[in-house]
Image: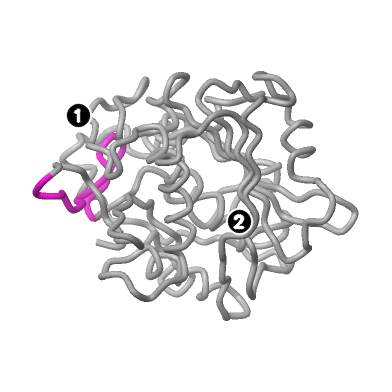
Amino acid sequence: MTPIYTFATLSLLFLSLHLTTTPSSAALVKQQPLTLKYHNGPLLKGKFSVNLIWYGKFTPAQRSIIVDFIQSLTTARTPHPSVASWWRTTEKYKGGGASTLVVGNQILHENYPFGKKLKNSHIIGLASKPNNKIDSIDVILTAQDVVVEGFCMRCGSHGSSGRVKRAYVWVGNSATQCPGQCAWPFYQPMYGPQTPPLVSPNGDVGVDGMIINLATLLAGTVTNPFSNGYFQGPPTVPLEAVSACTGIFGAGAYPGYPGTVSVDKVTGASYNANGVNGRKYLLPAMWDPQSSACSTLI
């Protein structure tokens, strides 16, 4: 299981590289080349169904934010900068070709069949139900009142399950547990530099935070599905396509400051990507193999 650690944890690591800089000078530090080594394993290329497994109670509005995001990944009918243009960076990874994700089955577990305190084994169990196709990714989404083992130290994870390995992702809603850790920059961080939080683009701090973490983990899943794809560091706690760029959302980002992003003139919400149905999202930078640097949409 590959975790995505909180912004605060990774921000402190990043800060250790700039202990003698002020925030204003940190923005001017020249970005050093970043290399994610390819470990010769398979990547997920081709068409994959994303099965959404909703554990706990999500409102229809919350579900639609996430469904629209998945649909936005591969549609070309949205204004630039778009979610789809962000996702196309994954095509630059070895082998080329697209990782086309489409919404598959949706399963609602609103009655909490395993209770409200889940272990990692429960997450794997939810992702290992029979009749799911190999060319699919199971995404387990846990509601804000569900406590998952290790949550808040990590905001989600991805891995593979079954004798025939099939990829899965887990992301939790941190709204009532640790939004300063897993929904930054839409909530004041618990640690590190303190800057005013941004207004979330869909009016839901918890779910907009889930989008950031889901985007991070989906990119990690298709570029490092079985812990032998693209990553830096140990395979148990790797820096992957997006987690290597934690905290960067726009130009000029530095620890505690997400960078320059667009602001909706009506709602005041911050975003950097357009999606289907008029949606707006804030997506993190992704490592670009061609430039060996974290690439932002704006």
Instruction: Quote the CA–CA distance across marks 2 and 1.
Output: 32 Å
Which residue position holds label 1? Answer: 196
Instruction: Residue lying at the far left in this picture: please name it.
Output: 265
Q: Position of residue 233 (x, y in %)?
A: 62, 48
The answer to whether residue 254 is magenta is yes
**What's the mark number on residue 177?**
none
Q: Residue at x 56, y 71 (%)?
A: 100
Q: Which is more toward the observer, 208 or 18?
A: 208
Which residue position holds label 2? Answer: 231
Q: Residues within 10 Å of mark 1 (few under 14, many from 20)?
A: few
**For this view, does 242 lie left or right of residue 129?**
left
The boundaries of the magenta stretch are 251-266
Secondary structure of the residue carrying numbered label 2:
strand
Q: Position of residue 247 (x, y in %)?
A: 36, 43
Callout 2 amino acid: Phe
- The quadrant of the rendering that contains the C terminus is bottom left
The answer to whether residue 297 is magenta is no
Q: Position of residue 273 (x, y in %)?
A: 30, 59
Q: Is residue 92 above or below residue 152?
A: below
- The quadrant of the rendering that contains the N terminus is top right
**For this view, does 187 lie left or right of residue 138?**
left
Q: Is residue 288 above or below residue 114?
A: below
Give the quarter of the image for residue 179.
top left
Majority SS type along the magenta span: loop
Callout 1 amino acid: Pro
Give the quarter of the image for residue 285.
bottom left
Secondary structure of the residue carrying numbered label 1:
loop
Q: Position of residue 129 (x, y in %)?
A: 81, 46
Q: Which is more toward the observer, 228 or 25?
A: 228
Q: Residues within 10 Å of mark 2 (few under 14, many from 20)?
A: many
Which label sits in the foreground, 2 or 1?
1
Q: Which is more toward the observer, 142 or 121?
A: 142
